[in-house]
Amino acid sequence: MGCNSCSTGKDGQPKGCKNNGTCGTDSCNKLSVFDWLSNMALPQGMEPFNIVEVRFKNGRKHFYKNTENLSLSIGDIVATEAAPGHDVGIVSLVGELVRVQMKKKKVRQDSSEVLKVYRKATQRDIDIWQEAREREEKMKVRAREIAIRLNLQMKISDIEFQGDASKATFYYTAEERVDFRQLIKEFAREFNTRIEMRQIGFRQEAARLGGIGSCGRELCCSTWLTDFRSVNTSAARYQQLSLNPQKLAGQCGKLKCCLNYELDTYLDALKDFPKSEVKLHTKKGTAVCQKIDIFKGLLWYAYEGDWSNWHTLTVEQVNKIIKANSKKEPVNSLEEFAVDLQQEEKPDYHNVVGQDSLTRFDSKGSGKKKRKNKRKKRKPQKNG
């Protein structure tokens, strides 16, 4: 449960986990990084890295220079440079790991994108920041109503206020270009603040909003995945998955990013496999591939016209038959090469500890019925 959901207490600190946003369990922080160098001291004469990573709403992160030499640690709320005014965020990483993250994201230290940290946030900064965050949900509902009234083909997915409440950024998704000049005028009149429209992709939308995937876990893009690689349907074909768009699509409506996770393993395993469209020619007939098991190294073939009977072959046997076909050497039948698969024996659980039956205390019959039967037997018969 995130800090926004488990409510906030004094000074904007969360009430739930009591760790002020630094629990490191990926619940409070999206795209959090574990600082495994936090308990290690720097060598003598080496100054600490003067750039920190600051996290804003929904995993948005930027790098800022600590020009004032402030004593900053993970979880501190700081006021940072913005254009115009200032923004408020939470320090998510300090020290040498920031240098590693900048190298990973290809951000130079002298880049104009790296702005400054002004100060640690005061109580007034935090109050203004929290008041602005509380306005965002109501504004999002009203903004969607205005967009629908103007017949704009777009979806406003999120709103983020700047820390000083001087500007609101509207994140939206759209399949085509949108003319929102009239929309901005109505937004500025309705919300009385500076408006910035920012279009994002469907994957970025899912990463910002988060959710639960079909695997039962939080979305990878909102917890740890930082780069969005292209995913093709060929990845599903290589892994022998059904090409069902409803099962292969994620929360964003695109192909799931996890289709790429094990793709390299499957490609390595498929190097020795023959192509499934290659037919095997024997004296008994032509056989066509019906199914393959990549990690067991097995293929199933059936003769044309006799599709119900499948014959199991190993990769080496199939390659041997293909090689014989290329040399026009006769092959009698697939039965000569067929493999008898041994079925795995299901474990039979025995009572090795000497435990009694779990139902030994259950009464076999109802006690009330027994008592009624006894009363009927004891009831004296009336003499005529």
Image (cartoon, rainbow, N blue to C red):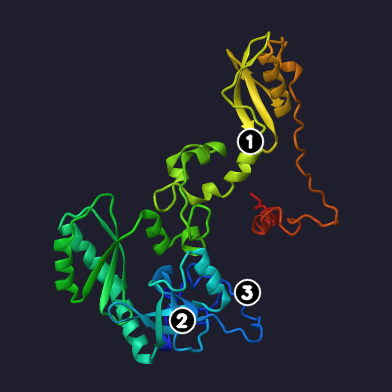
The residue tagged 1 is: 270
> Few, some or many C-alpha atoms within 10 Å of disc 3 (few <14, some 14-19, many ≥20)?
few
Q: In the image shown, does 221 or 69 lie closer to the viewer?
A: 69
Type of residue at label 1?
A: Leu
- First reached walking from the N terminus: tag 3 or tag 1: 3
- First reached walking from the N terminus: tag 2 or tag 3: 2
Callout 3: SS: loop
Whole-number angstrom distance, CA of label 2 to CA of label 3: 24 Å
Q: Where is residue 34 in the image (x, y as percent from the top left)?
A: 58, 72
Q: Is residue 149 above or below residue 300?
A: below
Whole-number angstrom distance, CA of label 3 to CA of label 1: 38 Å
- First reached walking from the N terminus: tag 1 or tag 2: 2
Q: Where is residue 165 in the image (x, y as percent from the top left)?
A: 28, 80
Q: Residue at x 65, y 59 (%)?
A: 368
In the image, taking residue 256 as reference, residue 350 lies left or right, namely right
Callout 1: SS: loop
Q: Position of residue 260 (x, y in %)?
A: 53, 48
Whole-number angstrom distance, CA of label 1 to CA of label 2: 50 Å
Type of residue at label 2?
A: Pro
In the image, taking residue 68 as reference, residue 194 lies left or right, namely left
In the image, taking residue 308 as reference, residue 199 lies left or right, namely left
> Few, some or many C-alpha atoms within 10 Å of disc 1 (few <14, some 14-19, many ≥20)?
some
Dot label at residue 14: 2
Type of residue at label 3?
A: Trp
